[in-house]
Amino acid sequence: MKKNLVQKSIFALLSIISLIVVAGVFSLIFFIVVRGLPKMSWEFLTKAPENGMMDGGIFPAIVGTLLLIIGSCIVAFPIGILSGIYMNEYAERNWFKKFIGMMTNNLAGVPSVVFGLFGLAVFVNFFGFGISLLSGSLTMGIMILPVIIRTTEESLKQVDDNLRLASYALGANKFETIFRVILPVAMPNVITGLILGIGRVAGETAPIIFTAAAYFMPEIILNIKAPVMALPYHLYVTATSGVDLNASRNIAFSTALVLLVIVLILNLTANWFRKTVDS
């Protein structure tokens, strides 16, 4: 009786904590929507910023954010998925594999500003890419790489070994087994890691300040060696500067709302793709 009471109390406490967390998230979203909607308009979404970013829109920042997401995904996804496959399917279970796994976990916990300084030192200065889309994409790609590697590795571990044995019994080699049997089965869970990576890239500010972001660009320059505007940095600038601080913060809330919608659309698209692959 006492054990059941303790168990019910713990479940009740966890339920209350979950409700508090959900309520906090919805309160935050509601606050952003209420503060951001008054400034929202078609011109705000399709025009370049004007008058010290106090007028006009945020279209270059939207395009820049999407370009950074695409660039970092091109860098991180192939390397991360192939690394996860190597770790689970090819690497021997010894101290070296444990060391790589530990370093990957540690890398996932490194603050984003450290990745920004790394990108500044290596890609901007050493390789001479400068403040550019290329430097930002490489930096952000490395930043999300540990999450993709670990997610891919854990997804492959969950695949039943009987599938591997059945594939070998039918005459397939290891490469064919991995890419025609194991990876398709694990792909829905692998996509979860890709979703987490996309969400992090879209919302990070510190790395792109050092490597990619421009303060003000009235025109879109489709060049990987050119800097780009980005919604997180634009949000930071408008929230902390401007002659009329109240007006600039209204723009910041509208920018935050657009960023929130973009991340939501990307997540919904990835989830739809995951369900399609799973079915």
Image: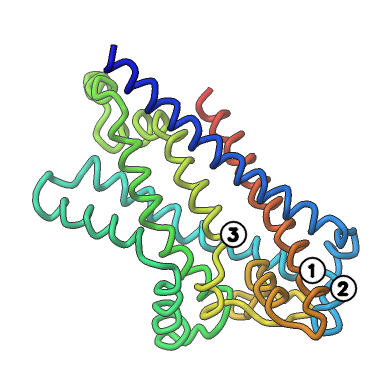
Residue under the image location 57 percent in, 79 percent down: 132
The residue closer to the viewer here, 73 or 265, is 265
In this rendering, position of residue 151 left or right of residue 217: left
Judged from the image, the secondary structure of the residue bearing numbered disc 2 is: strand
Q: How is the image coloured?
A: rainbow
Residue 63: x %, y % from top left: 71, 65
Mark 2 packing: few (<14 Cα in 10 Å), some, or many (20+)? some
Picture disc at residue 263: none
Q: Earlier in the sequence, mark 1 or mark 2?
A: 2
Ranked by sequence position, the earlier of labels 3 and 1 is 3
Image quarter for residue 43? Answer: bottom right
- The mark found on residue 202 in the picture is 3
Q: Nearer the viewer, mark 3 or mark 1?
A: 1
Q: Which residue is mark 1?
A: 251
Query: Considering the numbered disc 1 on the image, is that residue within a helix, a strand or a loop?
Result: helix
The correct choice, above or below, for 238 with respect to 59 in the image is below
Dot 3 or dot 2, earlier in sequence: 2
> Can you give x and y, in whole percent of width and height, for residue 241 in the image?
71, 82
Instruction: Name the side, left or right, on which 117 lies relative to 256.
Output: left
Q: Measured from the top left, where is residue 144 in percent x and y?
A: 43, 58
Disc 3 to disc 2: CB gap under 8 Å: no
Q: Amino acid at mark 1?
A: Ile
Q: Real-space Cα distance between discs 1 and 2?
A: 10 Å
Q: Nearer the viewer, residue 90 or 7?
A: 7
State the residue position of label 2. Answer: 56
